[in-house]
DNA sequence: TTGCTTACTTAACGCCGTTAACTCACGCAT
DNA sequence: ATGCGTGAGTTAACGGCGTTAAGTAAGCAA
């Protein structure tokens, strides 16, 4: 209870739970994150958490949301650094996505790697927000296409395909599934170059 | 115990466990697969399983192995159907990989989506075997490069990058994370075309 | 017959998410 | 001042999990 007085005055136990959950997630990983641990970390009973979150999934969704916002910030920063150079922007966005995943593996796991069967369906409003991150890629493709830098059929589909490629790259790296004899940065560069090369209209153009 | 007499004579309880595990995995998914359920399914005590498998991870590895062999079969079949057409072969391999993932989601999950922290490190011999699957892609690139069909720097790296792209595609589809407004097959085709286009040396060649 | 081995079971430990029932201090109306 | 409702938090319990330690019973060898 002495401990408890550390807490911000009162009423925001919810906030405290969320902060602690984030902290434990990053420290111990998703698979070691439990309601009981979160509770004991802040000297409350496990059931207290249920006063503020319906269940573990809901708590998790709140964390996912934080992660999506962080990713949005990262991509947003990158995007405005290359405002009128779609190719460079797309390349930088790819790098930023991968780097976000590699620097925040625990967030990445809950954001993109949890199968839906183990999780309540992602609520639609949040889903929409999560998709904003994809829009950075779509816009870059769109603008690039109109400037004749890119050769794109359907930017929405292509953006998703790019995302898939980046997601695979991050996933394999996080799962340590890439051949150890392959240099990590070489692999990342190859993945990005592979992605870009598919859409860049070469100087000796494809369309006559 | 009446039930028990159904079993193959004796001694191959190990086999029975494995078959039951596979069955339950496919039926209920990885997240619902438990030692206790496997045991109760075959009317043995949960601890019996430990007479044949050191722990759940080891049992899982045995299942992963089965999956890897299945995938190998699938890719192998495809590869020999396009023996001397590296481009068509690569395209077919991509399609086969994705189709394997989508038709065997539970296998796919344990084979490629489990994070290593929740699993004992994949034993090196099995790791090597798993990598044989990647060799189909590497060979296609290799042969394609020597026939001047592909423009490849390092086939080992490129094969991994292709794999990443395919893995991302399957993962997003299985996790139902692709924009619902995008047609599933369009997405798959886009992903494959994106991958291929990065390596195909266009008729109006890139290198002068 | 005794004793060893093999194949399996029972009981238990310490985790987990979650529910139901409770306590108890505070603020308010009487 | 007294009683009461309410909100915030608790304890106890349920049924699940992986795993270990100890026990048991049948079969076989000497």
Image (cartoon, coloured by chain):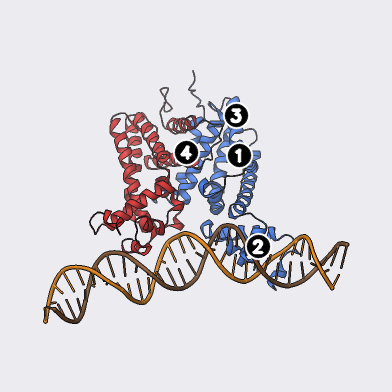
Chain colours: A red, B blue, C orange, D brown
Dot 1: what SS? helix
Quadrant in the picture for residue A204: top left
Dot 3: what SS? helix
Q: Do the residues at pointers 2 and 3 share their chain?
A: yes
Which residue is at the front of the view, A123 or B48?
B48
The answer to which of marks 2 and 3 sits earlier in the sequence is 2
Instruction: Kindly indicate whether the residue at mark 3 contacts the one at mark 2 (C-beta within 8 angstroms).
Output: no
Instruction: Kindly indicate whether the residue at mark 2 contacts the one at mark 1 (C-beta within 8 angstroms).
Output: no
Above or below B112: residue B19:
below
Dot 2: what SS? helix
Question: CA gap, disc 1 to disc 4?
Answer: 16 Å
Q: What mark, if any, has residue B48 been given in the picture? A: 2
Residue that label 3 marks:
B142
To which chain does the residue with label 3 belong? B
Residue that label 1 marks:
B131
Q: Residue at x 31, y 49 (%)?
A: A129
Question: CA gap, disc 3 to disc 4?
Answer: 21 Å
Q: Is residue A92 visible?
A: yes
To which chain does the residue with label 2 belong? B
Crowding around mark 4 (Cα neighbors within 10 Å: few <14, some 14 to 19, many 20+) is: many
- Position of residue B26 in the picture relative to residue A200 (left or right): right
Question: CA gap, disc 2 to disc 4?
Answer: 40 Å
Instruction: Kindly indicate whether the residue at mark 4 contacts the one at mark 2 (C-beta within 8 angstroms).
Output: no
Question: CA gap, disc 3 to disc 1?
Answer: 16 Å
To which chain does the residue with label 1 belong? B
To which chain does the residue with label 4 belong? A
Above or below D17: residue A167:
above
Question: CA gap, disc 1 to disc 2?
Answer: 33 Å
Residue that label 4 marks:
A169
């Amino acid at each position: 209870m002495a401990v408890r007085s550390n807490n911000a005055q009162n009423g925001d136990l919810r906030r405290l739970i969320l902060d602690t959950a984030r902290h434990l997630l990053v420290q111990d990983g998703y698979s070691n994150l439990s309601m009981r641990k979160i509770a004991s970390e802040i000297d409350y009973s496990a059931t207290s958490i249920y006063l503020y979150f319906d269940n573990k999934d809901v708590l998790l969704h709140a964390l996912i949301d934080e992660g999506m916002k962080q990713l949005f910030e990262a991509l947003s920063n990158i995007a405005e650094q290359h405002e009128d150079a779609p190719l460079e922007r797309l390349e930088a966005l790819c790098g930023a996505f991968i780097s976000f995943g590699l620097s925040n593996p625990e967030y990445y796991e809950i954001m993109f790697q949890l199968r839906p069967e183990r999780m309540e369906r992602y609520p639609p409003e949040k889903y929409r927000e999560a998709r904003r991150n994809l829009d950075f890629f779509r816009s870059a493709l769109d603008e690039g296409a109109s400037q004749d830098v890119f050769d794109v059929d359907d930017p929405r589909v292509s953006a998703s395909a790019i995302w898939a490629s980046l997601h695979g790259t991050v996933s394999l790296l996080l799962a340590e599934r890439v051949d150890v004899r392959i240099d990590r940065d070489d692999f990342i560069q190859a993945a990005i170059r592979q992605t870009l090369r598919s859409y860049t209209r070469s100087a000796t153009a494809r369309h006559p």
